[in-house]
Image: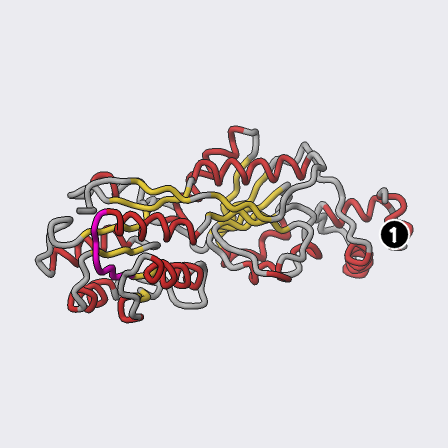
Amino acid sequence: MNIKEFAELAGVSPATVSRVFSRNPGVSGENVQKVLKIAEKYNYHPRISEKQKNVVLITPYDSVYPVQSCIDMLLMAVTRELPKHGFRVEILPVNSLERLSDVRFCGAVAVGLEPEMFKNWDQKYDAPLVILDRHVHGKKNKDHNLYYVNSDESLGMELAISYLKERGCRKIGCIIHGNPGEGNVDIRHEAISGLLKKYDFPADELLIRFSGNGNEKYVELIGKLLRQGVDALFCPGGNAGIVALYALSLYGKQIPEDISLIASEQTYFSNYAVPPQTTITQEYALVAEKVVNIIVDRIEGKDVARVTTLPYRLIKRESVK
C-alpha cells in the first residue's frame, strides 16, 4: 500500500499522513487518530527515511558514566558502534520517555528495560525498537517493530558451573543479582538449579540466593553460604565481583586458596582485581553490531529476525583454584 492509498482509507491528505508519522505537532488530534487507526488495521509501516539518522538509546537511569555494570557496558558498546555507520545518538532516560514523541528518529534501543514498558509501540512509532538483554516469551512478541538482542543466559550459567566442576570444586554457592520475576533472574535461577544437579553438586535451595537490586545483601549472603561449607562462589550479574571480593576479605577468606570465585565481567575491574577474576561475559561488541545491523536492514526494507541470541564467553583468570 502506498501513501496515497493509505491517505484515502484514512480520509486525509498524503501530506497529513506524512506529518503524523514524522511527529509534526501541527496535526489535529482527530486526524492523528484516523491515521493511527488505519495503520493498526492494515499493519501499515511507512518506509523509514534513509536521511533520518538519529538513534535513541533508552536507559534505565540518568547516569551513563562511570562504567560499572552490564547495562553500562552494553551502552558503551552501542554508542561506539552506531557513529561508525553515520548514526547520531541521543540518550533518553526512561523517566523522560514521553519526550520520545517529540523526537525524529530511525531507530531506538532499550537497554536493560522490560518489554512490558513498550506495549503498543507499533501504534505510536514507525521506527524499530531493539530491546537488549531481555528475553521474549511466546505471544509477547507481536509488535512489528520490536526486536530482541540477548545473550544465552543458560549457556553463561553452564560455562561457569562446568568450569568449577572441571577445577575440582565440590560445593558451589550462588548469588543471583536481582529479585525473582525481574529481568533475567528466573532464567538464571532455573539454569543454575538444573546444572547443580546435572554435575552432581549439592543443589539445596539454601545454596542459591538472590541479592535484590542493590549490593547491600552480599556480605550477609556470602556469610550464610560460607556457613554452608561452600568452596566456590558463582555470582552472576550486577557488581558482584568487586562486592564479593570485599565480603570475602571481611570473613578472612583468600581467593582462590580458600574459595574460588566466578562473577560477571566488569571490564574496568575484573582483570585488575587481586587476584584477577574469572568471569562470564556477554559479547558486547557483537551485541552492538547486531543492533546496528537490525536498524540498517529495517531502513533498507529487508526482513529482520525478531530475536537474536548470542553466546556468552568464559574468561579464565586466577580466581578459580
Place of residue 90 in the rendered image (x, y in percent of width and height, measured from the top left): 52, 42
Place of residue 142 in the rendered image (x, y in percent of width and height, measured from the top left): 67, 57
Place of residue 138 in the rendered image (x, y in percent of width and height, measured from the top left): 61, 61
Please check the rendered image and state whether residue 173 is part of the magenta-colored stretch, yes or no.
yes
Identify the residue position indicated by label 1 in the image.
12
Residue at screen point 67% across, 55% down: 143
Give the residue type at disc 1. Answer: Val
Residue at screen point 24% across, 59% down: 172
Q: Say above or below: 99 vs 219.
A: above
From the viewer's perspective, is 302 left or right of 41?
Answer: left
Range shown magenta: 167-174
Colour mode of the rendering: secondary structure
What secondary structure characterizes most of the magenta part?
A: loop
Q: Residues within 10 Å of mark 1 (few under 14, many from 20)?
A: some
Please check the rendered image and state whether residue 218 is part of the magenta-colored stretch, yes or no.
no
From the viewer's perspective, is 240 left or right of 96?
Answer: left
Q: Nearer the viewer, residue 105 or 129?
A: 129
